[in-house]
Image (tube, rainbow, N blue to C red):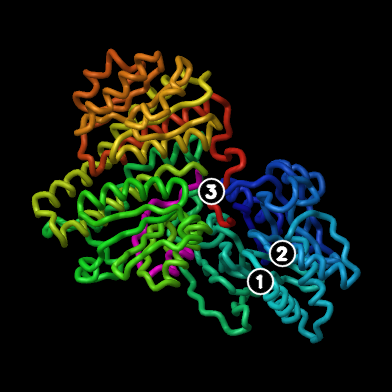
């Protein structure tokens, strides 16, 4: 969601902070601002709107200084206004603070400060309350070391806070010094030469350094030009490791593509290949997933699996339910992470939980992971960031190796997650009942995927023509059966996310149980109907829509094309593949359909309204 960038070094801070904010635009925001210490005071520039608006403001009135903090805000408390944009100040005007997260008890803290006297608030935000609280405590503390005072004031204030935070703050009278802290909202320290950085996402600073420390919850970091110190909220020395970031600035650029989303759609041959790399055991006809940290005997003892996630990750989990149950014959349940953490799900000791999140920082999924582990269940992660909170707090897991995903609408992360769930199904199946020949066929299907994805991507122009044809439609219905029902849900989600049109995904057979009332000549229905065991059932549903003059976009394969060419309004033909890998291929034309329709409608594909890439608040 919101983005934080901080810098302390020998260079001018303004261009570095602004560049970092631009690299975080994909996270979703509605206002932006910077606070730079110029030697005597803090110069602040902030405004509602895009970073381009902030850049124009900074061009007209350039802030000068070698250290500062910056922020992109996604409104939680208070309307989208210049006054509510970050940074916010304490009562003295000498401390500036930026904040990601939600301070749940900010009203009580504000009343406490108002009773204390001397506090006038200029915004509606919870963040300004935290700034005032830190400033008030700073004034009350004694000690000649102003840096220690600021750290201790931050520590004392955060002990009173209920909620989540990733913060960075500066003091106008403390030279070359930034304080950061996190709880439930990501914060990373970038380590450079004679300069250091803070950011909510490493992609903001990877152009300047590849050395990073991923802070843990309740860490407080004191950052100077040539040093840093990490401690806990309790005041103990913090444990940390400097990690090498696996990608560079070139990996988070659009290259020759007009949008990140389209770039990432076309990266899927490689991202799926990388999800499988080194994980296929040809001799044993199984998968090798050492990161699970479970011996075969432990895996055999698993008699129930729960997959949990949000949004696209939840849809991948739904595909995983079909995959694992078919390949391994193990009961699987899929839970919304936001619901799982708040309800008393009956679970036995032989239950294995997987938390699925591209970022590894999704607040609800992280909460579900913690709740599962709190109750003593082995909980594994499937995520794309090896240094993320979910990766660090889980009992093991599988890293996606998809590379940075910048587009807000998830694409390659979905197909990577589905691929990994197929590997998990193969591994569990082979230690139970799946024969070597069956395992070998699954491996052959997986190996063929990257090349088949390349074939599907060649349909982009055809899908663009279909998108143009239906650009005047005010929505779409998506239908699929079995493995492809979750793909229908995902196709509808992609359309909603970036076109803002009405869209619904349903099992095809549910058509006659109420949904058919929505069918009309100006509302297209997208049917995912590959040439598989349930094709004839899908065909029957398609005929029902046809009889009611509903336009039909049919996604099919093999002999399905011959059956549908005179029934469907438009046909998209993909390679004929096994059920186990079909959802990877069927998802991609729907990603392209949403993308091309959004472009045709003039939507901001990479920055869709109201959305954020990584939802790190509840």
Residue lying furthest right: 118
Front of the two marks 3 and 2: 3
Q: Which residue is labeled 1 in the image?
A: 225
In this rendering, the answer to whether 580 lies above or below 553 is below
- Crowd tier of the residue under label 3, counting other residues whose Cα lies within 10 Å: few below 14, some 14–19, many 20 or above: many
C-alpha separation, residue under disc 3 versus residue under disc 2: 28 Å
Task: Tell me the residue at 41%/49% (across/down).
Answer: 314
Left or right: residue 133 versus residue 430 is right
Q: Which residue is labeled 3 in the image?
A: 613
C-alpha separation, residue under disc 1 versus residue under disc 2: 9 Å
Q: Mark 1 and mark 3 in contact (Cβ < 8 Å)?
A: no
Mark before the other along the chain sequence, 3 or 1: 1
**First to last magenta residue range:** 387-407
SS class of the residue under badge 2?
strand
SS class of the residue under badge 3?
loop
Q: Which residue is labeled 2 in the image?
A: 67
Q: Mark 2 and mark 1 in contact (Cβ < 8 Å)?
A: yes
| Quarter location, residue 527 | top left
| Quarter location, residue 375 | bottom left
In percent of width and height, residue 72 lies at: 67, 51
Front of the two marks 3 and 1: 3
In this rendering, the answer to whether 460 lies above or below 165 is above
Mark before the other along the chain sequence, 1 or 2: 2
In this rendering, the answer to whether 155 lies above or below 470 is below
Mark before the other along the chain sequence, 3 or 2: 2
Q: Is residue 389 magenta?
A: yes
Q: Is residue 321 magenta?
A: no
Task: Tell me the residue at 46%/31% (across/down).
Answer: 594
What predominant SS class does the magenta segment belong to? loop
Residue lying furthest bottom: 143
| Quarter location, residue 292 | bottom left
């Amino acid at each position: 969601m919101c983005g934080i960038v901080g810098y302390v070094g020998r260079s001018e801070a303004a261009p570095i902070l602004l560049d970092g904010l631009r690299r975080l635009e994909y996270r979703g925001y509605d206002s932006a601002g910077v606070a730079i210490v110029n030697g005597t005071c803090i110069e602040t520039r902030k405004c509602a709107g895009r970073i381009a608006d902030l850049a124009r403001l900074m061009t007209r009135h350039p802030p000068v200084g070698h250290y500062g903090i910056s922020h992109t805000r996604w409104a939680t408390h208070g309307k989208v206004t210049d006054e509510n944009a970050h940074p916010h100040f304490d009562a003295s005007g000498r401390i500036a603070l930026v904040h990601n997260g939600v301070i749940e008890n900010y009203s009580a803290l504000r009343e406490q400060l108002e009773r204390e006297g001397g506090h006038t608030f200029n915004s509606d935000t919870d963040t300004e309350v935290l700034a005032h609280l830190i400033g008030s405590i700073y004034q009350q503390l004694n000690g000649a070391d102003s840096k220690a005072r600021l750290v201790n004031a931050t520590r004392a204030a955060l002990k009173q806070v209920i909620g989540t935070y990733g913060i960075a703050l500066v003091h106008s009278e403390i030279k070359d010094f930034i304080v950061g802290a996190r709880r439930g909202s990501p914060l990373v320290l970038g380590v450079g030469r004679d300069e250091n950085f803070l950011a909510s996402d490493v992609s903001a600073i990877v152009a300047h350094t590849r050395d990073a420390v991923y802070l843990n919850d309740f860490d407080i970091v004191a950052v100077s030009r040539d040093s840093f110190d990490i401690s806990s909220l309790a005041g103990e020395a913090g444990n940390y490791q400097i990690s090498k970031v696996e990608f560079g600035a070139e990996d988070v650029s659009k290259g020759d593509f007009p949008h990140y989303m389209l770039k990432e759609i076309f990266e899927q041959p490689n991202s799926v290949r990388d999800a499988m790399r080194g994980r296929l055991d040809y001799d044993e006809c199984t998968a090798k997933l050492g990161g699970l940290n479970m011996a075969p005997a432990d895996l055999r003892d698993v008699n129930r699996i729960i997959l949990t996630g949000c949004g696209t990750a939840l849809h991948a989990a739904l595909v995983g339910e079909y995959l694992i149950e078919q390949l391994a014959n193990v009961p699987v349940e899929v839970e919304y992470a936001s619901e799982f953490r708040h309800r008393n799900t009956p679970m036995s000791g032989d239950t294995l939980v997987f938390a699925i999140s591209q970022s590894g920082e999704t607040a609800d999924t992280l909460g579900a992971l913690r709740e599962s582990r709190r109750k003593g269940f082995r909980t594994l992660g499937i995520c794309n960031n090896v240094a993320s909170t979910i990766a660090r707090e889980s009992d093991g897991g599988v890293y996606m190796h998809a590379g940075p995903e910048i587009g807000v609408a998830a694409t390659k992360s979905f197909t990577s997650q589905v691929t990994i769930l197929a590997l998990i199904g193969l591994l569990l199946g082979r230690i139970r009942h799946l024969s070597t020949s069956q395992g070998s066929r699954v491996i052959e299907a997986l190996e063929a995927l990257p090349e088949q994805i390349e074939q599907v991507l060649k349909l982009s122009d055809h899908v663009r023509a279909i998108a143009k044809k239906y650009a005047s439609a005010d929505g779409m219905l998506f239908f699929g059966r079995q493995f492809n029902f979750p793909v229908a849900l995902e196709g509808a989600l992609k359309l909603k996310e970036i076109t803002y049109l009405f869209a619904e995904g349903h099992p095809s057979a549910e058509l006659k149980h109420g949904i058919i009332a929505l069918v009309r000549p100006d509302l297209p229905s997208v049917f995912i109907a590959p040439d598989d065991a349930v094709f004839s059932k899908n065909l029957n549903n398609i005929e029902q829509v046809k009889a009611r003059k509903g336009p039909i976009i049919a996604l099919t394969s093999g002999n399905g094309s011959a059956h549908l060419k005179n029934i469907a309004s438009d046909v998209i033909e993909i390679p004929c593949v096994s059920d186990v890998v079909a959802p990877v291929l069927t998802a991609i034309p729907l990603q392209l359909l949403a993308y091309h329709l959004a472009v045709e409608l003039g939507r901001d594909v990479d920055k869709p309204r109201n959305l954020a890439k990584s939802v790190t608040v509840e």
